[in-house]
């Protein structure tokens, strides 16, 4: 193993390089990035960078000197446009050949049909700076999509004094991430936080960059419009015959791309074999990219990787942290274990347990309950029965 080519200079790409060095790899590491920026962190883009509390540099995960010290050759602002077995072609025409290739290219914000150029999306640092500029001086914001990013941007905009309207096609926000009952708590946060939340609303299309038309014919106008309807891994530049790239590159449980040799994938761009049920799992959370990078780096070097970790995400909205730990998607039902949110009381302090068909704990979601969530970790890992899942 002499040369590892990492495609994607984001969180997962950088962590892969760091983990390779930490494991003693002394060969070449090349890192290819589509954006001109050094690797940076995305969570602050909808929080501290967007609010203006942080200068953009504070979101950087590494600087040119640190990358040099790590012994990483960077190709920034020069995206990979083709990947064939062991060979990566960049937009500039440069060709890199590696003994191992790691795809860590993340995902791109989903755009709606005929979305005007002046309607915002939020995925990159440049997107965040453009939205920040647009919000300063604006009086109203319309957010299409009541997901986590929509909720975080709404939080920032309301704090700046904007009128915020949120449109959601489904009857409950975040239902795919946390399910129906807990999604209703997310909805309460949005409306109690001051948003005009419109649920179950169909969007007919855009009139222009300030106005949308609903399926009812009603038009809504705002100074700024943000579309936050999820993300997708764009992998049309990967040309590996027989490899499934439809929803993230299909990989085994160590990140090896099925059907390819010496190619690994991780983070938002990858769908790893699910250890709990048939099929694969593509996860768009920060800790997932970090943890998978550690597994991939070790596997490239033929070393034993860390054991699988419990999925974890967080989102900061309306002064509290929403946290999800474990495999919420495996749950058959949910029960409240702390706080009053599920019975109509304050959302803050509520913890909800996710249970499988045998009433064993597969996950928890907490709202402003950061002190409690880690205490459920060993119980989820052990799949404790709900009667034994008492946390003091
Ligand atoms: C605004 C925002 C807020 C978020 N907040 C949270 C949060 O609060 N909690 C949480 O758990 N998760 C959060 N996430 C999700 C988390 O940031 C991602 O899951 C994580 O960044 C994924 O890491 P990654 O390395 O897979 O992808 P990325 O960090 O997206 O890095 C991929 C990199 O690859 C580059 N790239 C793409 N295509 C190419 C190409 N062809 N050639 C070369 N380079 C390419 C991209 O430009 C990018 O820099 C947030 C995401 C966003 C966008």
Image (cartoon, grey):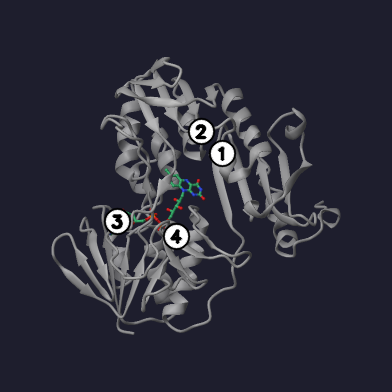
Does the residue tagged 4 have its C-beta within 8 Å of any atom of ligand 1?
Answer: yes
Residue 39 quadrant? bottom left
> Which residue is identified by label 3?
38
Question: Callout 3: helix, strand or loop?
Answer: loop
Q: Residue at x 56, y 50 (%)?
A: 313
Task: Label 2: state its secondary structure.
Answer: loop
For label 4, the crowd category at 10 Å Cα-Cα, with few meaning under 14, some 14 to 19 and many 20 or more, is many
Q: Circle 1 sits on which residue?
A: 174
Q: Is residue 46 above or below residue 387?
A: above
Q: Classify mark 2 as within 8 Å of ligand 1 or not, answering yes or no.
A: no
In x, y percent, where is residue 261?
A: 36, 79
**Circles 2 and 1: CB distance less than 8 Å?**
yes
Instruction: Pick whichever of labels 2 and 4 is earlier in the sequence.
Output: 2
Of the two numbered discs 3 and 4 on the same chain, state the one appearing first in sequence.
3
Tell me which label, 1 or 3, sits earlier in the chain.
Answer: 3
Q: CA distance from mark 3 to mark 4?
A: 18 Å
Residue drawn at x 45%, y 72% as measured from the top left: 296
Residue picked out by circle 4: 267
């Amino acid at each position: 193993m002499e040369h590892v080519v990492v495609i994607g200079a984001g969180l997962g790409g950088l962590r892969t390089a760091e983990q390779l060095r930490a494991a003693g790899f002394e060969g070449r590491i090349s890192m290819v990035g589509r954006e001109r920026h050094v690797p940076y962190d995305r969570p602050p883009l909808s929080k501290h960078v967007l609010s203006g509390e942080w200068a953009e540099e504070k979101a950087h995960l590494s600087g040119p000197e640190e990358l040099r010290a790590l012994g990483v050759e960077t190709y920034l602002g020069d995206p990979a446009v083709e990947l064939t077995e062991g060979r990566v072609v960049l937009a500039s025409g440069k060709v890199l050949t590696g003994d191992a290739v790691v795809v860590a290219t993340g995902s791109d914000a989903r755009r709606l049909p005929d979305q005007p150029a002046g309607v915002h999306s939020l995925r990159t640092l440049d997107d965040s700076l453009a939205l920040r500029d647009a919000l300063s001086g604006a009086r109203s914001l319309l957010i299409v999509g009541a997901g986590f990013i929509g909720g975080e941007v709404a939080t920032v905009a309301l704090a700046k004094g904007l009128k915020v309207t949120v449109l959601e096609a489904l009857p409950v926000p975040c239902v795919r991430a946390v399910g129906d009952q807990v999604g209703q708590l997310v909805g309460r946060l949005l409306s109690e936080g001051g948003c005009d939340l419109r649920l179950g609303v169909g969007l007919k299309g855009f009139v222009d960059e300030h106005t949308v038309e609903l399926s009812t014919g009603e038009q809504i106008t705002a100074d700024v419009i943000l579309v936050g309807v999820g993300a997708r891994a764009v992998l049309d530049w990967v040309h590996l015959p027989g490899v499934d790239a439809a929803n993230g590159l299909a990989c085994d449980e160590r990140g090896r791309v099925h059907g390819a040799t010496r190619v690994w994938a991780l983070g938002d761009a990858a769908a790893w074999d699910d250890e709990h049920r048939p099929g694969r799992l593509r996860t768009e959370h920060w800790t997932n990219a970090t943890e998978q990078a550690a597994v991939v780096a070790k596997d490239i070097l033929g070393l034993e990787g860390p054991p699988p970790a419990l999925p974890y995400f967080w989102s900061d909205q309306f002064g509290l942290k929403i946290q999800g730990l474990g495999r919420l998607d495996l749950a058959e039902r949910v029960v409240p274990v702390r706080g009053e949110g599920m019975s109509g009381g304050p959302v803050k302090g509520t913890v909800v347990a996710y249970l499988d068909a045998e009433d064993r704990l597969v996950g928890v979601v907490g709202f402003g309950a950061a002190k409690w969530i880690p205490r459920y970790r060993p119980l989820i890992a052990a799949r404790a029965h709900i009667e034994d899942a008492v946390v003091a």
